[in-house]
Amino acid sequence: MEGLKNHGLPRGRTADPDQRQALNGATAALRKEGFAVSAGGAGDRAQSRVRPELVATNGSRIIQVLVLLDSEVDSEKTRERIRRRYRLGETRVFVRWPLRWRMLTNVARWGLRGVAVSTW
């Protein structure tokens, strides 16, 4: 977990063991795909107040990663978070496996066709 060891986990949300597990799972999945992963938000405040939890890079490809807990999947706040990130570039949302279909349905209903949904 090179990126997270060097840059630390995102601040403010790491005290929750479920969030830590979700971040670690998403990081592992991205690394299997060949991405370098780091904590999100660095140098990004001018673009948006809504920062991704992780940023994954592979060459010139940059993916903003949002990692959602179960309670966040259907939230209006989540809808707005994804929409704001989506406008700024490639975005991927990670959820627990049982919630993948529901998240895909939400993304389609919200009109965010370019947002990928993966599981951690």
Image (cartoon, rainbow, N blue to C red):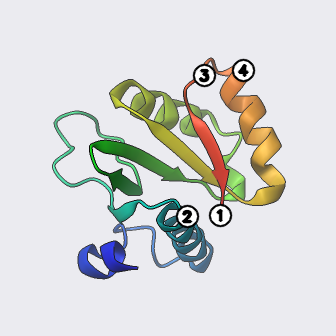
Which residue position holds label 3?
Answer: 113
For the point 71% across and 39% down, the residue is: 74
Which residue position holds label 4?
Answer: 109
Q: Label 4's element?
A: helix
For the point 35% across and 63% down, the residue is: 36
Relative to 73, is 97 above or below? below
Disc 2 vs disc 1: Cβ atoms closer than 8 Å? yes
Which residue position holds label 1?
Answer: 120
Q: Label 1's element?
A: loop
Give coordinates of residue 35: x percent, y percent.
41, 59
For the point 20% across and 43% down, the residue is: 45
The crowding category of the residue bearing disc 1, from other C-alpha atoms within 10 Å (few below 14, some 14 to 19, many at least 20), is many
Residue 61 sits in quarter: top left
Q: How many numbered marks are there?
A: 4
Of mark 4 and mark 2, the one earlier in the sequence is 2
Amino acid at dot 3: Arg
Q: CA distance from mark 4 to mark 2?
A: 24 Å
Q: Label 2's element?
A: helix
The crowding category of the residue bearing disc 2, from other C-alpha atoms within 10 Å (few below 14, some 14 to 19, many at least 20), is many
Q: CA distance from mark 4 to mark 1?
A: 22 Å
Give coordinates of residue 2: x percent, y percent.
33, 79
Of mark 3 and mark 1, the one earlier in the sequence is 3
In the image, farthest residue toward the top: 111
Which residue position holds label 2?
Answer: 26
- Which one is closest to the eye, mark 4 or mark 2? 2
Disc 4 vs disc 1: Cβ atoms closer than 8 Å? no
Relative horizontal placement of residue 112, taking residue 37 as reference (left or right): right
Relative to 1, is 114 above or below? above
Amino acid at dot 2: Ala
